[in-house]
Image (cartoon, rainbow, N blue to C red):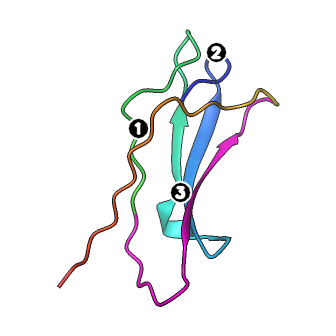
Amino acid sequence: LSSGNNNDVAIYIAKNGVVIAASSTALTTSAGGRLENATCQTLSELTTDDYFEVWVENRTASVNITAEELNFIITEIG
């Protein structure tokens, strides 16, 4: 992710448009405005037509956050 220098940002996972509170991850961008190797995870049960989204928030400023690379993995447990 990239944003403004030293910005507090958050990453969330939302299920069907609703943030899963346990997925909230708070992070800080570097002096160069980059956030590297960040992780966000949660456990949730899916049924037909459910969907996940990754949401980001800049908690410091109104600077936009740009996702440059994203790896999103869903796996079955059990």
Question: Does label 2 or label 1 sit earlier along the sequence?
Answer: 2
Residue 19 % position (x, y) = 62, 68
Q: Are marks 2 and 3 in contact (CB under 8 Å)?
A: no
Q: Measured along the vertical axis of the image, is residue 33 above or below residue 49? A: above
Looking at the rendering, the stretch of residues picked out in magenta corresponds to 42-61
Q: Left or right: where does residue 9 sit relative to residue 27?
A: right
Q: Measured along the vertical axis of the image, is residue 70 above or below residue 66? A: below
- Look at label 1 and name its amino acid: Ala
Residue nearest the viewer, comparing 47 with 22: 47
Q: CA distance from mark 2 to mark 3?
A: 21 Å
Q: Which mark is residue 24?
A: 3
Residue nearest the viewer, comparing 62 with 26: 62
Q: Residues within 10 Å of mark 3 (few under 14, many from 20)?
A: some
Residue under the image location 48 percent in, 62 percent down: 23
Q: CA distance from mark 3 to mark 1?
A: 12 Å
Q: Label 2, secondary structure: give it.
A: loop
Q: Measured along the vertical axis of the image, is residue 60 above or below residue 45? A: above
Residue under the image location 57 percent in, 61 percent down: 53
Q: Residues within 10 Å of mark 1 (few under 14, many from 20)?
A: few
Residue 47 % position (x, y) = 46, 90
Q: Label 3, secondary structure: give it.
A: loop
Q: CA distance from mark 2 to mark 1?
A: 16 Å
Q: Which residue is mark 1?
A: 38
Question: Does label 2 or label 3 sit earlier along the sequence?
Answer: 2
Secondary structure mostly seen in the magenta stretch? loop
Q: Left or right: where does residue 26 sit relative to residue 41?
A: right
Q: Measured along the vertical axis of the image, is residue 42 above or below residue 39? A: below
Which quadrant does the C terminus fall into? bottom left
Q: Which mark is residue 5?
A: 2
